[in-house]
Image (tube, rainbow, N blue to C red):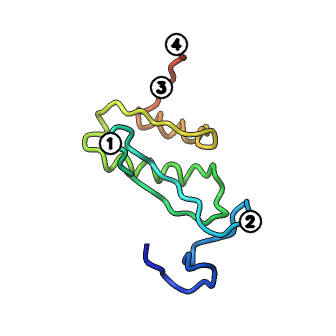
Amino acid sequence: MPHSGGTGRGGCGPDAAVTFKKTFGFHPLAAWHANTTECLAMLLRPGNADANTVADHIAVLTGALAQIPGSSAAKILVRADGVGATHALLEHLEALSLFSVAAPG
C-alpha cells in the first residue's frame, strides 16, 4: 500500500491510530469467499475503531456481495465473529433475505 503522507509513526498513513493494545496502526475489517479464499471486500479502519460498528460491517458485506455475480438470488452463508453478531446486522441480512437461523445438529 503506498504511503500517503508523513505521520512520523512508521509510515502507516494519516488514518492510522493508537489501538487498544497501545500499538499504532489499523483495525481492518474484511470479507472472504470461503471456497476460493479471495478477499471480496476490505475496510481499512483506524486502529481505535470499535470492533462492532454495524455500519462498517454492513459496508463490507455490501462490497462483498457486489463482487459475487447473482448474489441476490444465491444462497449465501454469512458468518461473523462475536462482535459482528449484532441485532442491526441481523436485521440488515433479514432485509436482504439472506438471514435464517438453523439449530445445530
The residue tagged 3 is 100
The residue tagged 2 is 22
The answer to which of marks 1 and 2 sits earlier in the sequence is 2
The answer to which of marks 3 and 2 sits earlier in the sequence is 2
Q: Nearer the viewer, residue 17 or 67?
A: 17
Find out whether the residues at labels 4 and 1 contact each other: C-beta distance under 8 Å: no
Q: Residues within 10 Å of mark 4 (few under 14, many from 20)?
A: few
The residue tagged 4 is 105
- What residue lies at 41% left-to-right and 37% top-to-bottom? 96
The residue tagged 1 is 36
Find out whether the residues at labels 3 and 4 contact each other: C-beta distance under 8 Å: no
Disc 1 marks which amino acid?
Answer: Thr
Find out whether the residues at labels 3 and 1 contact each other: C-beta distance under 8 Å: no
Q: Is residue 51 above or below residue 78?
A: below
- What residue lies at 36% left-to-right and 46% top-to-bottom? 65
The answer to which of marks 4 and 1 sits earlier in the sequence is 1
Is residue 49 found left or right of 31 in the rendered image?
A: right
For the residues labelled 3 and 4, the Cα–Cα distance comes to: 15 Å
Tell me where residue 36 appears, x and y as whole percent: 32, 42
Q: Is residue 72 above or below residue 29?
A: above
Disc 4 marks which amino acid?
Answer: Gly
For the residues labelled 4 and 1, the Cα–Cα distance comes to: 26 Å
Tell me where residue 48 appears, x and y as whole percent: 67, 63
Foreground tag (3 vs 1): 1
For the residues labelled 4 and 2, the Cα–Cα distance comes to: 42 Å
- Name the image quarter holding the N terminus: bottom left
Q: Residues within 10 Å of mark 1 (few under 14, many from 20)?
A: few
Residue sitting at the far front: 10
Foreground tag (4 vs 1): 1
Label 3: element kind = loop
